[in-house]
């Protein structure tokens, strides 16, 4: 057993799990009251390839705005600074973390699963009439980021635990806690905390397998829990621990009916196709 803490594991591999520089800069600017929307637009516009990609996304069916958005300044005004930060993070994080130990998981498998969960979370947010659906999208995209950290920093141990979970039909989270002293959900939440992301993303990632234990953002945790189940239907399961029954309490938490699951799954699948076409073209089949 090699117990430590999520903080120490991340600190030991800070360069390996750091955010892309521009996302770190955007986080700092958004949290700085002296920075204006114009300042943020200027920073995004300095990267021509990123600016072009963001404009392609906001003008796609993924958003469905009635009129064309021609500049990053207009995108900031219409979409919002935090929402555009989330889109920037979504596109760049997938590109940054595109090398994983192939014996554990391919980058395509890892990210298609997480993008499917992100799209399901966005679909659920729209069904529940939650504003700023990008917040739930990015939470779904990052819900398993703790697994990625484990794979990158402890590949041999991760392979052994995955094998035990599969062959012995054991709960992967329990095996992780026995080995590391924490599970992938806790590790992912700590990484988001060190990335200076808001608690509205952190707690749902920490509790996506146990939404009833969330205290401040239980509704968001329930969305990610249900989105994970939907994602496992429209894309292949990432690891055995993901293929779990839906916690039936989430239906009451979200004021939804199990009868809506088939419809939500179909909508999520369509959203996934749009996302792969415009945001993650390198992963589109």
Image (cartoon, grey):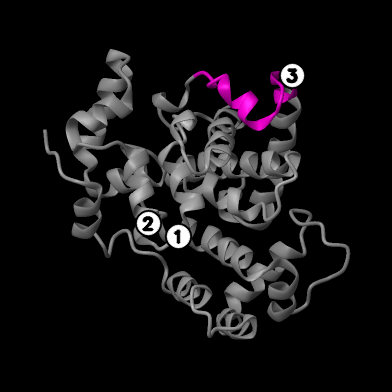
Instruction: Give coordinates of residue 78: x percent, y percent.
Output: 75, 70
From the image, which quarter does the C terminus lie in? top right
**Magenta segment: does it hold 190?**
no
Label pair 2/1, CB-CB below 8 angstroms: yes
Using residue 156 as the reference point, say whether residue 126 is left or right of it: right
Alpha carbon distance from label 2 to label 3: 36 Å
Mark 2 residue element? helix
Considering depth in this image, is 267 or 129 the residue closer to the camera?
129
- Give the residues drawn in magenta, as a range: 245-261
Q: Which mark is residue 197?
A: 1
According to the image, label 2 marks what residue? 193
In the displayed structure, 72 sits above or below 66; it is below
According to the image, label 3 marks what residue? 259
Which residue sits at x=76%, y=59%?
Answer: 60
Which residue sits at x=63%, y=75%?
Answer: 51
Q: Which mark is residue 251?
A: none
Using residue 141 as the reference point, say whether residue 239 is left or right of it: left
């Amino acid at each position: 057993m090699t117990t430590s803490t999520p903080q120490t594991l991340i600190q030991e591999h800070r360069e390996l799990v750091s955010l892309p520089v521009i996302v770190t800069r955007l986080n700092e600017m958004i949290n700085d009251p002296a920075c204006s929307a114009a300042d943020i637009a200027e920073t995004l516009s300095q990267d021509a390839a990123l600016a072009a990609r963001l404009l392609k996304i906001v003008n796609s069916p993924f958003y469905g705005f009635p009129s064309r958005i021609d500049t990053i300044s207009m995108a900031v005004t219409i979409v919002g600074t935090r929402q555009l930060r989330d889109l920037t993070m979504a596109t760049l994080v997938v590109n940054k973390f595109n090398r994983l130990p192939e014996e554990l998981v391919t980058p395509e498998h890892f990210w298609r699963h997480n993008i499917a969960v992100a799209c399901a979370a966005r679909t659920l947010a729209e069904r529940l009439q939650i504003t700023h659906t990008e917040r739930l999208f990015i939470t779904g995209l990052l819900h398993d980021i703790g697994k990625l950290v484990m794979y990158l920093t402890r590949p041999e141990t991760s392979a052994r635990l995955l094998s035990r979970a599969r062959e012995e039909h054991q709960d992967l989270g329990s095996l992780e806690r026995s080995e590391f002293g924490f599970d992938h959900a806790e590790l992912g939440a700590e990484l988001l905390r060190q990335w200076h992301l808001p608690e509205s993303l952190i707690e749902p990632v920490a509790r996506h397998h146990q939404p009833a234990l969330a205290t401040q953002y239980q509704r968001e945790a329930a969305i990610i829990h249900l989105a994970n189940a939907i994602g496992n239907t429209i894309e292949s399961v990432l690891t055995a621990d993901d293929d779990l029954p839906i916690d039936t309490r989430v239906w009451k938490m979200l004021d939804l009916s199990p009868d809506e699951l088939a419809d939500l799954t179909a909508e999520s699948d369509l959203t996934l196709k749009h996302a792969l076409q415009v945001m993650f073209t390198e992963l589109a089949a």
